[in-house]
Amino acid sequence: MEIVIKPDYETMSRCAGDFVEAWLRRKPDLVLGLATGSTPLGLYRDLIRRHRDEKLAFARVTTFNLDEYIGLPADHPQSYHSFMRENLFRHVDLDPARTHLPDGNAAEIAAECAAYEAAIRSAGGIDLQILGIGHDGHIGFNEPSSSLRSRTRIKTLTEQTVRANARFFGGADKVPRHAITVGVGTIFEARCCLLLATGTEKAAAVAAAVEGPLTAMCPASALQFHESCTLIVDEAAAVGLKRRDYYRYVYDSKPAWQQWEKSAG
Ligand code: F6R
């Protein structure tokens, strides 16, 4: 795992923008896995700016989102379809036909999940997977005790996740209890994972994911086993990392040919 610690949310988001841009320049037909939630908003704003000011192109990119609530109409303001449209898709030159989210209103949820997995496979697999992390260590909506080999399926959100997402819905009672999420096993097959975390409220989850045991009780800990995983976190989210000075030393000592960051943050 590569751990990159940035002073604040803005520099963390810009650094993540550099990471995504480096991938895009290398592979303009990137298959990009996307997350929703508050954490990647700064990254999405940064990518929109790069598209506008630096002509960073998304025209050949294919996207797959991690998850969608079950039972919310796709045009509901809190659906992840709406989230992605408002916060990224409509601001860049992505081809709508190449953007994918699970259909939380499918008549046959199991068939929808199987079709989503098949679509990822037929796109050639995910090159770069963007991830946030839940307070309980979830990635996507793979809550604690999710099989580390799980595939796209229905999950019941924990009470903690429902409470955390109540801020978007104006009350916990309005948050759907179920979602379709790609599995930990599906995430694990991405060629590269980029996990972002911000704020002290994520510090315990980040520490468990990076320095804790590999366990289904913290699904993000599965990333310790991933061949190519970078975490970019701000100082606040890094406070629980015992070896943070070491991670800083490693990052600062990177040979020039391995560097992807454009500007020091
Ligand atoms: C949503 C997703 C979730 C979030 C996590 C953190 O697509 O993948 O795992 O990343 O719940 O959410 P925020 O960023 O809102 O704290």
Image: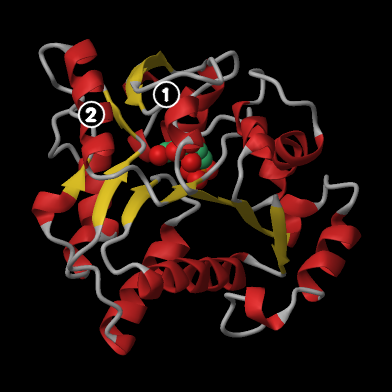
Could you tell me the amino acid type at mark 1? Ala
Could you tell me the amino acid type at mark 2? Ala
Residue 175 shows in this picture: no
Q: Nearer the viewer, mark 1 or mark 2?
A: 2
Above or below: residue 113 compared with residue 193:
above
Residue 90 lies, in percent from the top left, at 17, 63
Q: Give 9 or 64, whichever is nearer the viewer.
A: 64
Question: Would residue 129 appear left or right of 169 to someone viewing this image?
Answer: right
Circle 2 residue: 118
Dot 2: element = helix
Residue 172 lies, in percent from the top left, at 42, 23
The residue that appears at 62% across and 54% down in the rendered structure is 230
Q: Within the image, what quadrant is residue 27 found in?
A: bottom left
Q: Split into 4 quadrants, where in the image is the C terminus?
A: bottom right
Circle 1 residue: 172
Q: Give 204 or 214, whichever is nearer the viewer.
A: 214
Residue 120 lies, in percent from the top left, at 27, 37
The residue that appears at 75% across and 41% down in the rendered structure is 210
The residue that appears at 73% across and 26% down in the rendered structure is 214
Question: Would residue 171 appear left or right of 104 to someone viewing this image?
Answer: right
Residue 251 shows in this picture: yes
Q: How is the image coloured?
A: secondary structure
| Mark 1: few/some/many CA within 10 Å (<14, 14-19, 20+) | some
Evaluate if marks 1 and 2 touch, with contact meaning CB atoms under 8 Å apart.
no
